[in-house]
Amino acid sequence: MNCPLRTSPYFNMLTLDDVAQLFDVSPSTIKEWCAQGKIQDFKTESQNGLAFSHEDVAAAYFFMAIQN
């Protein structure tokens, strides 16, 4: 029997709060970064409306780390 959650296109994605915790910033900062193109987000139908792939978050983290 397949788990319906695993068939979701957002399975194994990070939430806005997850990403904010990883970068140690507020969720509003992550939203600003999305608007600035610093991190790729995916629109969802959830309450906050954003999801992030592990790969995109890792790439953004690396890019921001080498710029400092």
Image (tube, rainbow, N blue to C red):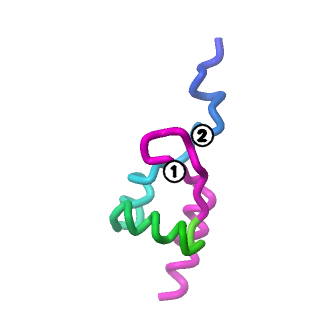
Image location of residue 50, percent across then percent down: 51, 50
Residue 6, quarter of picture? top right
Q: Residue at x 54, y 49 (%)?
A: 51
Residue 10 image position (x, y, % from top left):
60, 40
User: What range is drawn magenta here?
Assistant: 40-68
Residue beneath the point at 54% across and 69% down? 35
Q: CA distance from mark 1 to mark 2?
A: 10 Å
Answer whether residue 44 is magenta in the image: yes
Amino acid type, mark 2 = Tyr
* 49 sits to left or right of 55: left
Residue 28 placement: quadrant: bottom left
Q: Nearer the viewer, residue 18 or 38?
A: 38
Measured as percent of width and height from the top left, residue 65 is found at 50, 80
SS category of the residue bearing label 2? loop
**Front residue of 41 and 47:** 47
Q: Is residue 44 left or right of residue 48?
A: right
How many marks on residues? 2
The residue indicated by pointer 1 is 50
From this viewpoint, which residue is outermost toward the bottom?
68
Q: Amino acid at mark 1?
A: Leu
Q: Nearer the viewer, residue 62 or 44?
A: 44
Viewer-side label of 1, 2? 1
Residue 10's disc is 2
Image vertical order of residue 64 relative to residue 40, above or below: below
Tell me the quadrant of the picture where the N terminus can be found: top right
Q: Which mark is residue 61?
A: none
